[in-house]
Image: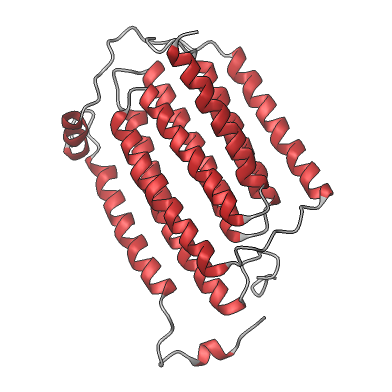
Amino acid sequence: MNTGIPLSYFLILASIMFFIGVYGFLTRRNLITILMSLELILNSVNINFLTFNRYLYPHKLEGFFFSLFVIAVAASEAAVAIAIIINIYRRFTTINVEDVDTMRY
Amino acid sequence: MTANQIMFFLFSVVIIVCSILTVTSRRILRAATYLLFVLVSSAGLYFMLDYQFLAAVQLTLYAGGIVVLIIFSILLTSQISQKFEPVEWKKSIFSAVASIAGAVITIITILDFKFSATTQAAKEVDMHLVGNSLLSVGEDGYALPFEVITILLLAAMVAAIVIAKKAGPKDTHSQTTKHV
């Protein structure tokens, strides 16, 4: 490989990033910060896909296109999530997940 | 150490430190700024892997689009000067144990596994190839997922407008049952 960096370094970096995102997802209360943790998780998955594509299957493009589609899905998800968050704020005047429990059974 | 390795370690340090700050910072606008640093450094990693097009998409769409969207919604919904309550220590410790255990198991598995690379020649990813693959239906063609994504983006756009717009005079009575 021309970059001189082992494959496992990229994978370890991506998994550390993924689990930092999981930690944020579990501890945060604010809806927007939860969304930011989700972006971290999606981004680490993208790094994984591209690394596998470049190191193990350089004659194919599957990882490349998969991460392209992941980015598109993340963009639309962020747009819809922020529309929902603004609507929740309008109705409850808070975006703290623990105060928005009207639909809780 | 070659220049490549130095760049890689620089990007990794920025990614890890800024990710931790993103999920632990108690001021929400700072968290969004740290997220921006993480996304830009990931674009640097994509450049190192020789995926220039995807790095440009990452910079314009993630760093330029999503972070700006997040910052706009922060400005619309939060007090900037307000600090979050610190996380309960019990919740924080349990979440940290769960994440660290997951990370350790994953890293051990990665280090144990012997990846076997192919000997086939690498394909140069240029814009011609990307464009042709996105619209071809044969071998190495991605026309179907491309069409699915177009429908998804249209649906997301319509949904975002419908959800976020103010209720009209017709359905204002649903707004009167306000729970606080």
Q: Quadrant of residue B78?
A: bottom right
Taking the image as drawn, is residue A79 in sight?
yes
Residue at the limit of the structure toward the right, as seen here: B90
Residue B77 image-quadrant placement: bottom right
Residue A31 in the image: x percent, y percent? 59, 60
Q: Residue at x 53, y 44 (%)?
A: B35
Q: What residue is drawn where x is 65% and y is 82%?
A: B179
Q: From the top left corner, tell me how far across and down residue A49 is, in percent.
A: 43, 29
Left or right: where does residue B65 sit relative to residue B127?
Answer: right
| A38 in relation to B111, above or below | below
| Viewer-closest of A104 and B18 | B18
Q: Nearer the viewer, residue B68 or A22?
A: B68
On-image quarter of the N terminus of chain A: top left
Judge left or right: residue B120 versus residue A34: left
Q: Position of residue A82 (x, y in %)?
A: 48, 63
| Residue found at x 68% / y 46% | B24
Taking depth in this image into account, of B167 and B75 the one nearest to the observer is: B75
Examine the rendered structure and indicate whether residue B22 appears above or below residue B12. below
Q: Residue at coordinates 43% horizontally, 55% vertically from top-left? A: B68
**Which residue is situated farthest in the front direction here?**
B81
Q: Do we see residue A77 in this rendering? A: no
Q: Position of residue A84 (x, y in %)?
A: 49, 67
Q: On the image, which quarter does residue B28 sit in?
A: bottom right
Q: Nearer the viewer, residue B85 or A102?
A: B85
Q: Is residue B85 above or below residue B97?
A: below
The chosen color scheme is secondary structure
